[in-house]
Image: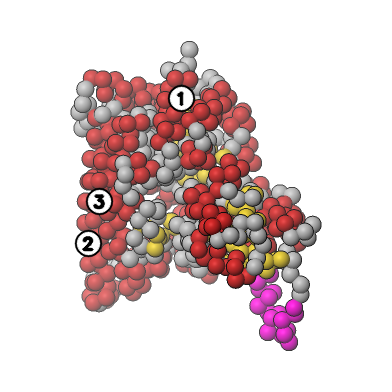
Amino acid sequence: MEKQWEELSSDEKQEALFQRWLSPEGVEFASPEAEKLYKERVTRIKDAIQLKKLPDRVPVLLIPSFFPAFYAGMTPLEVMYDSEKANMAWEKFYLDIQPDGHFGCVAPGPGRFFDILDYKLYKWPGHGVSPEHTYQCLEGEYMKADEYDAFIQDPSYFFTTTYLPRIFGALEPFKMLPNLTVVAEMYGAGGTFIPYGLPEVQAAYKALLEAGSEALKWGGYCAAFNKEMAESGFPACQAGFTKAPFDTLGDTLRGTKGIMVDMYRQPGKLLQAMEAITPFWIKKGISEAIGAGNPLIFIPLHKGADGFLSDEQFKTFYWPYLKKIILGLVDEGVVPFCWAEGGYNTRLEVIRDLPKGKTIWLFDIVDIAKAKEALDGIACVSGTMPMDLLTIGRPQDVKDHVKKCIDTAGKGGGYIMANGAFFDDVKPENVRAMVDFTKEYGVYK
Amino acid sequence: MEIVGKRFADSEYFISELMYSGEILRGITDMVKPRLAEETDFKRLGKVVMGTVAGDIHDIGKNIVVFMLDVNGFEVYDLGVDVPAQKFVDKIKESGAPIVGLSGFLTLAYDSMKQTVEAIKNAGLRDKVKVMIGGGQITEQVMKYTGADAYGKDAMVGVSLAKKWTGAE
């Protein structure tokens, strides 16, 4: 009899997720050739991650920002507000350039959703940024220095009644919402729900319902995109994403300056807050991976980069909670796909402390030989194609960089060629050179 | 703050310490300022026009550079974020600043920087100012592409460049 999910070891769970990824449900391949390519691609990436077998060649992945829009002659504004156009542009990009997998068509939307809720956290095309430019975060103290206790005691209530009203203008009335954790017996229950009758609160809910409909519509396009890509032979390389607790607090709650100062003025509270949100982000990653039948969960890493924190601070505030997230995912068979944005040369020795063959580390700016040395036999190394080469370099510069990475990090497997940071309006011939040359030069003999 | 800057340049201090020191200094300034009879007028090393280039609204890096230039004795005109090329040109003309710092985080900033340098050139000011650029994805290759004079990997390189160009060092 087949074992229940709970009875499987973490290795068996990982294998089960890889198998589901290899034979995706509900996908009818366009041709036997597409099916063959799909399975080869998944196997190639799996071998690079698990470090057990040498892949047939170095896999190559492209994680674009708005490049597909520019490549198709569209503006970021167009694809943020027209999901059909977005799908067309993203499909054209992947089908033309043919990397070993795709990262969905989720970046560009849904514009209307953000309009309806009057999103304050970002500027986007048509809302503070020109149509030709991409969305950008407006850093601020969306959580105040004296709000740690409220946050730690009840993160969900804090989000609903304090954080969401600050980042979504239309949800400002949520400030008046009751804490439903105190709904108990018949006596008093009615009173708790009075705020839902207020006209402002009802208007906020109407906006929320409308925004939800937009999100659902957009989600349909995202799902259709994934299905079509799989049927054409391209596996999705991201089932969802999660975040490091230090980044969660530092990026969109306290802001960079806020969290830096908190490390000195209220370190205990900061640690408690990170502890409080860690389980939420572990659960998010697990449920997205299991829901999609795909082990890869992205983790973009920001404020642990070289130069931001001292070694001591990294080891005290950043790494312990990120490690908890990673291990929490690994336990359930999920493969954390860590993307270290910025420099990571000084962190290599710390991040080595991980189980073998369970993670991918995509680096932006790193000494690739040192990264390979540190993670050899521990984790799959990836990335480092620099933005300046893709944007203003020549195809030969790109090929030289591919060669350097494959010669060092590619040795013995365990390497995936990829861009170091999200890319927008770069030269298509450089992107093509990166993919084609990896396929040519990266074959293991 | 000069010590903080030096320690930062020597990789003894990190952005965390810079920001915390800045916060402490701000606290002290807030306390001391009302008690000062009048602004003590001290001689500044030179003028610098700073801003994040058009289309880019990232300001953490730019703010650190502005702060470090300020505490190192420069008079900084901070134009903010998403600054059109013409605004840089106007400020250079108005202030007579011999140094311009262009910041950018996105790769889209490469072209905005290039266009800003060109606008400075077209205004006939290129030989009157030195241009330095900086940001997460800025390299020597980008510097050449934009036509800037120098680039900096961190804020203290910006301070060193400004000191060198004003003859303060």
Report the chain holding disc 3.
A
The residue furthest right is B169
Q: Disc 2 and disc 1: Cα gap in Å? A: 45 Å
Q: At x 39% / y 59%, what residue is drawn? A: A129
Precedes in sequence: disc 3 or disc 2: 3
> Nearest the camera: B30 or A6?
B30
Tell me which amino acid carries mark 2.
Glu
Q: Which secondary structure lies at badge 1? A: helix
Q: In this view, does A89 lie to the left or right of A249?
A: left
Q: At x 21% / y 51%, what residue is drawn? A: A217
> Nearest the camera: B104 or A107?
B104
Q: Name the residue under label 2.
A: A210
The residue furthest bottom is B37
**Segment tinted magenta in the rendering:** B21-41
Mark 2 touches mark 1? (CB < 8 Å): no
Q: In which quarter of the image is residue A198?
A: bottom left
The answer to whether residue A286 is above or below residue A439 is below
Residue B168 x %, y %? 78, 60
Do tags 2 and 1 sit on the same chain? Answer: yes
Label 3: few (<14), some (14–19) or many (≥20) C-alpha neighbours in 10 Å: some
Q: At x 60% / y 65%, what residue is drawn? A: B92
Report the chain holding disc 1.
A
Label 2: few (<14), some (14–19) or many (≥20) C-alpha neighbours in 10 Å: some
Report the chain holding disc 2.
A
Tell me which amino acid carries mark 1.
Thr
Q: Name the residue under label 1.
A: A438
Q: Is residue B1 left or right of residue A133?
A: right
Q: Mark 3 points at which residue?
A: A82
Foreground label between 2 and 1: 1
Residue A250 visible from this viewpoint? no
Residue A80 x %, y %? 30, 52
The answer to whether residue A23 is above or below residue B111 is above
